[in-house]
Amino acid sequence: MKSLKANDLREKTVVELEELLETERASLFDFRRKLAFHEIKDVNSVKQQRHKVACILTVITEKKRGIR
C-alpha cells in the first residue's frame, strides 16, 4: 500500500477518514497476529502500520476541532 501523506488525508472528509481508519486498524490487527504466530519476520511493518493509524487519528482530530 502506498504511504499516506498528511496533505492527502486532509483532503478527505471525516467519514472517509473513519472508514480508512477502520481498514488500517484491521490491517494492524492482522500484522500483529501474523507476528505473534511467526508468520512474518518484518517487525518494522507493524511500526509503519501504527504510524499510519496515528496519522489518520491526528487528521480526524484536527478536522473535528476545526484546526485546519
Image (tube, grey):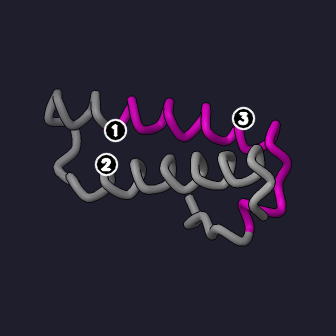
| Residues in magenta, as a range | 8-31
Q: Would you identify the image quadrant in which residue 39 lies?
A: top left
Determine the residue positioned at 80% across, 54% down.
Answer: 66
Q: Is residue 15 above or below residue 46?
A: above
Which tag, 3 or 1, sits closer to the chain's start?
A: 3
Mark 1 lies on a secondary structure that is helix
What residue would you read off at disc 3? 19
Taking depth in this image into account, of 22 and 38 the one nearest to the observer is 22
Instruction: Give yes or no for contact between labels 2 and 1 (Cβ–Cβ under 8 Å).
Output: yes
Taking depth in this image into account, of 65 and 25 the one nearest to the observer is 65
Which tag, 2 or 1, sits closer to the chain's start?
A: 1
* Residue 26 located left or right of residue 4: left
Determine the residue positioned at 22% across, 54% down.
Answer: 42
Question: Is 3 one of the magenta-colored residues?
Answer: no
* Residue 58 located left or right of residue 9: left
What residue would you read off at disc 1? 31
Badge 1 amino acid = Phe
